[in-house]
Amino acid sequence: RASDLFDKGSPVLAALISVLADLGLLRIFVLELDDKIAAVSINFEQRGTMMAFVTTYDPEYERASPGMVLMMDYIQWSFDRGLATIDFLCGGEDFKRRFATQSVTLSSMMGARGLRGHLAALADQVSHASKSWRTRRQPKAEAPDE
């Protein structure tokens, strides 16, 4: 079943934001242009790490990449405050491959009962090995010059 986290009127996101705010972990970043919101990023800070939960933008400003601009702002904000890491969390968005210096698989488990299951498991292993190989071949993000 697909997540209803972002469905209009869903109380789940509001509840999550409320809990993070109550714990003092919530970090919301807003990019405005002419008194209009161009992009919003909902993040949380935990153990010296900025957890980049979700960034969204107004499609009217898509050409200017407001989500990317806002992301650069919260990354700079995080480093200025002594945070050591930005965690882009799960998902395979392209920007993560451009900015990330490492990728971590938290855990992966699979079981197969029949021939088709074993073939699917093998295909999955090949896919993960291929992605890992491509990631290792990709140039890492360079640190900015001081």
Image (cartoon, grey):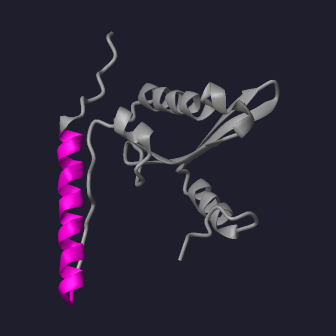
Mark count: 0
What residue lies at 45% left-to-right and 25% top-to-bottom?
80
**Residue range (magenta):** 112-136
Q: Residue furthest bottom?
A: 113
Q: Is residue 80 left or right of residue 22?
A: left
Q: Quadrant of residue 122?
A: bottom left
Q: Is residue 135 left or right of residue 86?
A: left
Q: Main secondary structure of the magenta part?
A: helix
Magenta-colored stretch includes residue 119: yes
Question: Is residue 12 shown to the viewer in this render?
Answer: yes
Closer to us: 51 or 62: 62
Q: Position of residue 40 (x, y in %)?
A: 65, 41
Magenta-colored stretch includes residue 92: no
**Which quadrant is home to the C terminus?**
top left
Q: In the rendered view, tell whether residue 42 sits above or below residue 67.
A: below
What residue lies at 30% left-to-right and 21% top-to-bottom?
143
Q: Position of residue 35 (x, y in %)?
A: 82, 28
Q: Is residue 40 left or right of residue 98?
A: right
